[in-house]
Image (cartoon, rainbow, N blue to C red):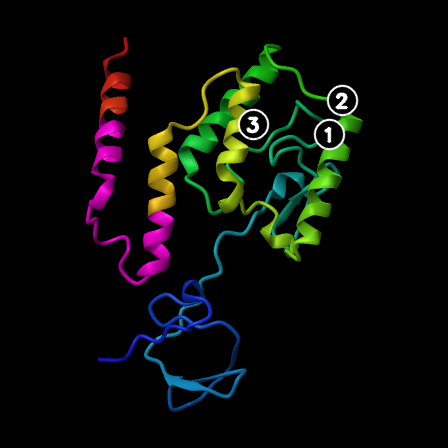
């Protein structure tokens, strides 16, 4: 049985023996890293994630994909040049997907039906430019453009306001924060165990909300 190695400075950098910055793999099965350290590996798995690709827009200058950044998009959804005729739902990363995508869908449907109004093209372009400036100031590469983990609920609250409906429930926010904390503390098995702890009341509230939705005609 091999030892699970986890760097002290960033426990989220490694999950189940996966390292960053591989220098080379040797014929004897060892992997050498840039810092000179090495481990014996049974399998090297390339976890590249999803790549955005829109072949039907290949000859269209409306949006482009560069370093996995779909740009320009107002609030990750509307290209300012052609909004609202074209929209993208489901691009954000590191989020609880379906509640966010549901809000995006409500927003797009409301805009298309005329119930909600978008800003002018120039205003949307300025918003996109300011957004990218903030990311650059944080030192984030373009491939993190749609990564919303630390801004997920801020984004959902904004969408909910546009859609004139309530934002994410309190229990959902607390449960998300609790899950993130557990993921940092034990990344190797945080999905496998639920210890309840002080959060059983959140689960109970979630079940009550789900039951209420199921009873609606």
**Region of the chain picked out in magenta, as a range:** 179-207
| Quarter the N terminus occupies | bottom left
**Closer to the eye: label 3 or 1:** 3
Q: Which mark is residue 58?
A: none
User: Where residue 27 sits in the image (x, y, percent)?
Assistant: 42, 90
Residue at mark 2 to residue at mark 3: CA–CA distance: 18 Å
Q: How many other residues sit within 10 Å of disc 3, few (<14), some (14-19) or many (≥20)?
A: some
Mark 1 is surrounded, within 10 Å at the Cα level, by few (under 14), some (14 to 19) or many (20 or more) other residues, namely: many
Q: Position of residue 164 (x, y in %)?
A: 52, 15
Give SS at disc 1: helix
Closer to the chain start, of discs 2 and 3, is 2
Q: Which residue is mark 1?
A: 124
Badge number at residue 120: 2
Dot 2, how many residues are within 10 Å of its Cα: few (below 14), some (14-19), or many (20+)? few
Asked if residue 184 lies left or right of residue 196, the reply is right
Does 46 appear above or below 74? below
Question: Relative to 187, is 127 above or below?
Answer: above
Point out residue 32 in the picture as x, y percentages from the top left corner: 47, 85
Q: Which mark is residue 158?
A: 3
- The answer to whether residue 192 is magenta is yes
Decide which of tag 3 and tag 1 comes sooner along the chain. 1
Residue at the spot 33% in from the left edge and 68% down from the top edge:
16
- Quarter that holds the C terminus: top left
Point 46% across, 86% down: residue: 37
What separation in Å lies between label 3 and label 1 (alpha carbons)?
Answer: 15 Å
| Most distant residue in the bottom direction | 28
Q: Tell whether label 1 touches label 3 (CB within 8 Å).
A: no
């Amino acid at each position: 049985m091999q030892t699970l190695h986890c760097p002290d400075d960033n426990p989220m950098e490694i999950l189940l023996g996966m390292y960053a910055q591989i220098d080379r793999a040797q014929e004897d099965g060892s992997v050498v890293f840039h810092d000179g350290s090495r481990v014996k590996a049974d399998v090297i798995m390339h976890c590249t994630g999803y790549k955005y690709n829109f072949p039907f827009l290949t000859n269209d200058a409306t949006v482009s994909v560069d370093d996995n950044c779909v740009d320009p998009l107002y609030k990750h959804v509307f290209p300012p040049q052609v909004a609202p005729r074209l929209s993208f739902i489901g691009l954000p990363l590191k989020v609880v997907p379906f509640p966010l995508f549901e809000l995006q869908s409500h927003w797009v449907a409301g805009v298309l039906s005329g119930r909600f109004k978008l800003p002018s093209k120039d205003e949307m372009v300025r918003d996109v430019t300011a957004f990218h400036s903030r990311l650059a100031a944080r030192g984030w590469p373009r491939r993190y453009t749609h990564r919303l983990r630390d801004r997920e609920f801020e984004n959902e609250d904004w969408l909910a306001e546009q859609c004139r409906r309530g934002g994410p429930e309190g229990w959902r926010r607390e449960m998300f924060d609790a899950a993130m904390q557990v993921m940092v503390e034990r990344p190797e098995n945080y999905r496998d165990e639920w210890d309840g702890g002080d959060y059983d009341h959140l689960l109970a509230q979630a079940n009550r909300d789900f039951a209420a939705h199921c009873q609606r005609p």
